[in-house]
Image (tube, helix red, strand yellow):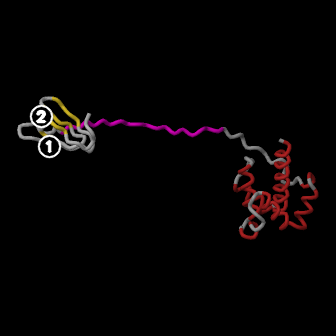
Amino acid sequence: MMQQGQPMMQQGQPIMTQPGQPMMQQGQPMMMQQGQSMMMQQGQVAPMHSQTTSNTNVIMINQQPVTARAAPREWSTGLCGCFDDCGTCWYAIFCGKYLLCDISQRLGEGRCFTVCCPFPLLSLRIKFRAEQNIKGSLCNDYLTVEYCYYCALCQLAREIDHVQHIQRVN
């Protein structure tokens, strides 16, 4: 067995070639290891250059898991359901800005959201409706907030209470 880096000898003569190149020596191919060198003597066969190329096509299918989403649900109370929670209704009428800040805080937007956002109630209603998979549309949300502001504010507060109550029970 030859050590790496030592020249290969044939009949006492060193044979030089490139590492990894096949070498024909008296009709038999020889492979050189990396780091070995061979010197060709006159009358010997020169190294043969042959390459085989194989193409392999790999097709990877990355399939995302399919999750079935439940059908959208209705709001737990109607838009004019103020008699379901009179305290929230009074709070909205007399301290609407504070109720809006409280709702913003409960939805994870922080109290300053109501000052920074041009349409805070509309934005919070859309966010909550999308997160909770509640039936509706952007147009419906806009019209509700535009023409029934305090009712929409109370409905959103009641719905947040309803969802938090269900989460505590479960």
| Quadrant in the picture for the C terminus | top right
| Numbered range of the magenta stretch | 49-67
Q: Which of the 4 image quarters holds residue 35?
A: top left
User: Among all residues in the image, which is located at the extreme bottom?
Assistant: 115
| CA distance for labels 2 and 1 | 12 Å
| Quadrant in the picture for the N terminus | top left
Which residue is the site of mark 1? 39
Q: Position of residue 68 (x, y in %)?
A: 66, 38
Residue 64 lies in the magenta-colored region = yes
Which residue is the site of mark 2? 11
Residue drawn 84% across the image and 45% down it: 166
User: Among all residues in the image, which is located at the extreme left?
Assistant: 43
Which amino acid type is marked by label 1? Met
User: Among all residues in the image, which is located at the extreme front?
Assistant: 12
Residue drawn 43% across the image and 37% down it: 59
Secondary structure of the magenta portion, mostly?
loop
Q: Is residue 72 left or right of residue 94?
A: left
Which amino acid type is marked by label 2? Gln
Q: Is residue 58 above or below residue 89?
A: above
Q: Is residue 50 above or below residue 124?
A: above
Q: Is residue 14 left or right of residue 85?
A: left
Query: Is 12 or 80 nearer to us in this picture?
Result: 12
Q: Are marks 2 and 1 in contact (CB under 8 Å)?
A: no
